Amino acid sequence: MDRAQMIAVLSRTALFGTLDGGTLGKLAQACAARTYRSGQFLWFQGDAGDHLVVVVDGLIKVVVTSEQGDEMVLVTLGPPETVGELALIDQGPRSASAIAVGTTTVLMISHAALLQLVRTNPVLLDALLGSIGALVRRLTEQAADLVFLDLAGRVAKLLVRLAEERGREQNGVVTLDLGVTQSDLAHMVGGSRPPVNRILQGLAARGLISMDGRLIVIRDPAALRRRAGL
């Protein structure tokens, strides 16, 4: 990618989109583009947090793994989202692994370069704090859902959220390309694949959704929101 393309990508992110052209240019100079194959780790849980990434193309899943090998998918991220900000704040190790879902291209920005810009740019500092705040809010909501919603409610709520973030709406029907497997979907709601599959089949039987591989069509968004307790 050339510098102009990098600037265009950075300008579309929530974290860097408010920066002026000159600052975006400096940030682009500190970026390096890299492409990962499907299933390749961008980093492992426990690694040093020395950079963040901006998703240019593809999808990243952020995964926490227990000592017993159980997994929970915290979130999936597509263009032009960012991941890796947390280590900027506490300079600690990675709290989760990041894995490419399909061929994925990212911009890598070293924390040293980013911190240098933060020190001289209060707008970037405000954006960074806002990004961390959004992360904390999302994780708090996920923790509450695990306690207060049953598995079917969590599946419905996840579909609603993904539809709002990435769905294509037409005539009241939302088409959602999950980009992940049903096992990943199950890991995102703290369940396993068989019961989550049964829940999806149940939603389909009631006419709320239809499924075609990783493609889900939400045919009754209002009813799905009610099932999610929203």
Image (spheres, rainbow, N blue to C red):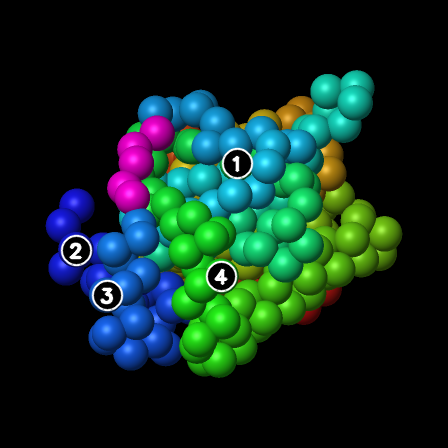
Residue 114 picture location, percent across and down: 44, 59
Helix, strand or loop status at disc 2: helix
Q: Are there few (<14), some (14-19), or many (20+) residues within 10 Å of tag 2?
A: some
Residue under the point 23% across and 65% down: 25
The residue range painted magenta reads 32-36
Residue 120 seen by the camera:
yes
Q: Residue at x 79, y 19 (%)?
A: 68
Q: Which residue is mark 2?
A: 3
Q: In this rendering, which labeled residue sits more in front, label 4 or label 3?
A: 4
Q: Residue at x 66, y 40 (%)?
A: 93
Nearest to N terminus: mark 1 or mark 3: 3
Left or right: 215, with 200 as reference point:
left
Q: Earlier in the sequence, mark 2 or mark 4?
A: 2
| Three-letter amino acid code at the position of disc 4 | Leu
Locate residue 188, reporting x and y percent. 63, 41
Q: CA distance from mark 1 to mark 3?
A: 27 Å
Residue 20 lies left or right of residue 66; in this view the side is left
Of residues 91 and 130, the one drawn nearer to the viewer in this rendering: 91
Report the Cα–Cα distance between label 3 and label 2. 8 Å
**Residue carrying label 1:** 98
Tell me whether circle 3 and circle 2 mark residues in contact (CB < 8 Å).
yes
Dot 4, how many residues are within 10 Å of its Cα: few (below 14), some (14-19), or many (20+)? some
Q: Which residue is mark 4?
A: 115
C-alpha gap between disc 4 and disc 3? 16 Å
In the displayed image of the protein, which residue is found farthest to the right?
Answer: 147
Q: Which residue is mark 3?
A: 25
